[in-house]
Image (cartoon, grey):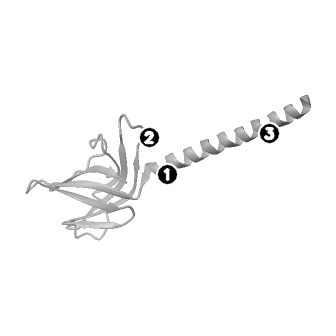
Amino acid sequence: MNLKKNIRLGKIRSNLFILILFLIISFDTYSSDNLEGGFTDIKILDKISSKNTLIKLKNGEDAIYKDLLIKSMKCKNSEFDDNPEITAYIQVSDLTNKDKDDVFVFNGWMFSSSPSIAPFDHPVYDIWLVRCY
């Protein structure tokens, strides 16, 4: 009788362990997939006309805005809801540059909460990160 209880208890413990392991793995997979987005929203300020324009970028594709060629390579949301942080790897080329060197005006990570960490420095335009989804 005691042996049957031990076998039954062992099966319950192993099933419980498998269930907990499955929940941990599925939660971890869900949260990491939810952090990276496929689209990036940026705002562009034309300093001459003082107009803001919202641009939706599909990650990995080029978008042209007036004299700028903009490409968002990757974007990611923070894990914390109390202080949300959005980061995106963005490349910007100036199309008025007649040199065919393909040198970027900006090539790096942009942060929504601190745009001055890696500032976009252009005489006519200003860019900042708005959203990743």
**Residue 64 lies in what quarter of the image?**
bottom left
Residue, far front:
1
Identified by mark 3, the residue type is Lys
Residue drawn at (64%, 45%), measured in percent from left and top?
A: 22
Residue drawn at (76%, 39%), measured in percent from left and top?
A: 14
Instruction: Decide which of 112, 5 is in the foreground and name it.
Output: 5
From the image, tell me which residue sits under label 3. 11
**Residue 92 lies in what quarter of the image?**
bottom left
SS at mark 3?
Answer: helix
Cα distance between the residues tagged 1 and 2: 11 Å
* Residue 39 horizontal side relative to residue 96, left or right: right
From the image, tell me which residue sits under label 1. 33
Instruction: Decide which of 117, 113 is in the foreground and name it.
Output: 113
From the image, tell me which residue sits under label 2. 79
Whichever of labels 1 and 2 marks the residue nearer the N terminus, that label is 1
x, y (%) of residue 31? Answer: 50, 46
Q: Quadrant of the C terminus?
A: bottom left
Residue drawn at (52%, 49%), measured in percent from left and top?
A: 30
Whichever of labels 3 and 1 marks the residue nearer the N terminus, that label is 3
Q: In which quarter of the image is the N terminus?
A: top right
Identified by mark 2, the residue type is Glu
